[in-house]
Amino acid sequence: MRRPIIAGNWKMYKTVAESVAFVQELLPKIETYFAIDKVVCPNFMAIPTVSEVLKDSPLKVGAQTLHWKQEGAFTSQTSGEMLKGYIDFVIIGHSENRAYLAETDETVNKKLHAALQYGFTPIVAIGETKDELEAHLTTEVLHKQLQGALANLDAHAASTIILAYEPIWAIGTGLNAKPEDANRVIGEVIRPTIATLFGEETAQAMRIQYGGSVNPSNMLAYMQQPEIDGALVGGASLKVDDFTQLIKQTAEAKGL
Ligand code: PGA
């Protein structure tokens, strides 16, 4: 079975002090769920401190993006070189960065290669807009995003990355995709696309999360879907009790 992974994307929430207090409270509640990867992705400001607090613990730290260059005249950006030693995961291609920060499939691909070079596990976010959904373009959009994002990757590297299927219309809106629909998109569109690009073995090995308005009252239904290997969570990852519930329900649904 693919190892489930639950990642909290904290976006631009929590100060350094709040981030530290959060993980100190969360850790004892979730550390015994050994069969699940558990990740928090704080703001860059909090990463070094949170990383120090969580050193050698089973709760891992991720960044919310990175720049593909090692250094340079790129105001506001943070490179893999700077993140090295502090993180294990990095979210790439989040729809908010695609919408507000000019992220494209091409920059996603550059960031993906940079992340792998530094030994980080990329969590690559893909998903269609509401207009694309209504125009029945989901398959085409995901196809294009995957081809662009995963260009020039070999099958072995591909099998180590994580995808997050996040329908854009479901992010932060409370309008979550139906669990069976998310399962179908992953099983009938995303995995077959990966199989075409890298072979069936890689497609079966790759971990694919769902993301978009996941919370403790719908989590169980998502995790009961065989194609869904975890979740990328925004709002519900900001509360210790909710995050704990998400991990517990994953264990329950997957029989871990
Ligand atoms: P949400 O965010 O859980 O608040 O919808 C998900 C995400 O942006 O990854």
Image: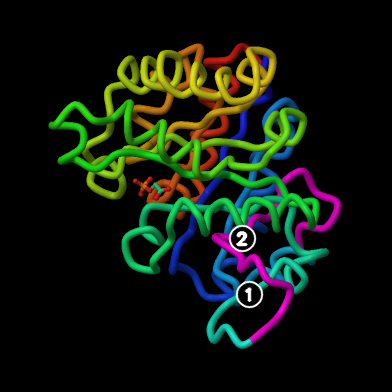
Q: Which mark is residue 63?
A: 2
Q: Residue at x 61, y 19 (%)?
A: 203
Asked if the stretch drawn in magenta spans residue 211, the answer is no
**What secondary structure is the magenta-colored segment mainly?**
loop
| Residue 93: image location, x then y, percent | 48, 52
Q: Residue at x 52, y 15 (%)?
A: 253
Question: Mark 1 near mark 2, Cβ–Cβ under 8 Å?
Answer: yes
Q: Nearer the viewer, residue 235 or 68?
A: 68
Q: Which mark is residue 78?
A: 1
| Residue 22: image location, x then y, percent | 58, 60
Figure check: 230 above or below 232: above
Q: Residue at x 44, y 69 (%)?
A: 12
Of badges 1 and 2, the one in the foreground is 1
| Residue 59: image location, x then y, percent | 71, 47
Query: Of helix, strand and loop, which one carries label 2?
Result: strand
Query: Of helix, strand and loop, which one carries label 1?
Result: loop
Figure check: 89 above or below 214: below
| Residue 109: image location, x then y, percent | 57, 51
- Which image quarter holds the C terminus? top right
Q: Which amino acid is tagged 2?
A: Ala
**N-terminal of the two: label 1 or label 2?**
2
Residue range (magenta): 53-72
